[in-house]
Image (cartoon, rainbow, N blue to C red):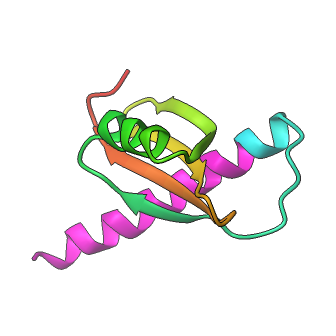
Amino acid sequence: MHSGCVFSNVWMRLFFELIFLIFLLENKIAIKYYINTINVSSIDNYIDMIKINEGEIIIPKTLVSGVGWTAAFQELQGNTFGLMQDDPTAK
């Protein structure tokens, strides 16, 4: 893999974390922990699987124009994770 790709993926992940932070602050959601983010090929499929398995979507699918899609969920044990789908054409 070209090292430039790894570098850009790191920046993209940091960008998504910043989007989560902004969403949490705008909606006055208390930030008590860091949100680990999982890169997925289809955010819609993962959201469906989370709902089927009784997880809770706490940040709905959100557009990050020119970057992709993001969301966050809480699983049954109370752990929170972010989802990220890369899509530079997203608008």
Horizontally, residue 54 falls left or right of residue 8, namely right
Quadrant of the drawing holding the N terminus: bottom left
Q: Position of residue 76 (x, y in %)?
A: 61, 59
Horizontally, residue 15 falls left or right of residue 68, namely right
Toward the top, the furthest residue is 91
Horizontally, residue 4 falls left or right of residue 16, namely left
Image vertical order of residue 66 relative to residue 18, above or below = above
Give the magenta part as a residue range.
1-22
Image vertical order of residue 88 relative to residue 79, above or below = above
Q: How many marks?
A: 0
Tell whether position 38 is magenta: no
Toward the left, the furthest residue is 1
Image vertical order of residue 51 relative to residue 15, above or below = above
Question: Nearest the camera: 26 or 36?
Answer: 36
Tell whether position 7 is magenta: yes
Q: Position of residue 67 (x, y in %)?
A: 38, 40
- Say which residue appears at 41% left-offset and 61% top-offset: 38
Quadrant of the drawing holding the C terminus: top left
- Say which residue appears at 33% left-offset and 27% top-offset: 90
- What is the chief secondary structure element of the magenta stretch? helix
- Say which residue appears at 43% left-offset and 39% top-offset: 52
Horizontally, residue 10 falls left or right of residue 21, namely left
Question: Nearest the camera: 64 or 31?
Answer: 31
Q: Position of residue 39 (x, y in %)?
A: 35, 58
